[in-house]
Image (cartoon, grey):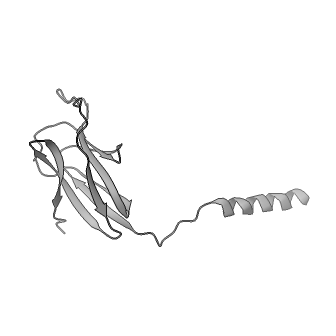
Amino acid sequence: MRWSFFGLVSLLSLFAAVPQASAAEDYAVLIISRERLEVPTNCEVGLYVNDQLAGRLFQEQSTSFNFPEGKVSLRLKLLPGQVPGCLPGLLAPKAQEITLKAGDVRKLRIAQGADGMYLKAAKLGY
C-alpha cells in the first residue's frame, strides 16, 4: 500500500512538472514560395531561419512556418546536391530580417537580383 501511495505521488509530480501549452500565444504564418521561375537554376535553395537550415525548395515549391511574434532572420543559399554545378559559394549571403505580428499571414517569394537571391513580398492569392 505504501509503494502505491509513493507511486501515485510521483506520478502526480510528473504532471505538475510538464509545461502546459498556452492557447493565449498567437502565431504568425510565413509562406516562402519558389513557384515563379525567377531564379534560373535547378539547384535546391536552402532557407535558413536564424542561421539554422529550416527548409529546402526546388522550383515550383513552397513551404510555410508558424512563428511567434517578433523578428525573424531569413537567409537563402544554394545547397550542394546531385545536380551538376550546384555548389554553394564561399561567402555567406546577406540575411533579411522581418518583423512578424501575431495573426499575420505573409507570403514571400524567392527572387534573383544583382546581389544574388532575396525574398520579395508576394500576394497571398486566395
Residue drawn at (13%, 41%) of the image? 115
In depth, the one of 120 and 9 nearer the eye is 120
Q: Hey, which residue is sitting farthest right in the picture?
A: 1
**Quadrant of the rendered image containing residue 77:** top left
Of 9 and 114, the residue lying toward us: 114
The answer to whether residue 108 is visible is yes
Q: Does residue 45 show up?
A: no
For the point 23% across and 33% down, the residue is: 91
| Left or right placement of residue 43 versus residue 22 in this view | left
* Residue occupying the far top of the picture: 84
Residue 110 place in picture, x, y as percent:
17, 50
Front-lying residue, 126 or 68: 68
Is residue 90 rendered to the left or right of residue 20? Answer: left
State the count of labels. 0
Q: Quadrant of the N terminus?
A: bottom right
Determine whether 116 is above or below 72 in the image.
above
Q: Is residue 85 above or below residue 34?
A: above
Left/right placement of residue 70 relative to residue 35 reads right
- Residue 93 in the image: state x and y as whole percent: 23, 40
Q: Residue at x 18, y 48 (%)?
A: 118
Residue in view at x 30 percent, y 61 percent? 99
Q: Quadrant of residue 90?
A: top left
Q: Quadrant of the C terminus?
A: bottom left
Front residue of this view, candidates 105 and 116 = 116
Q: Residue 98, image x and y in percent?
A: 27, 58
Tell me residue 125's x, y (percent). 16, 66
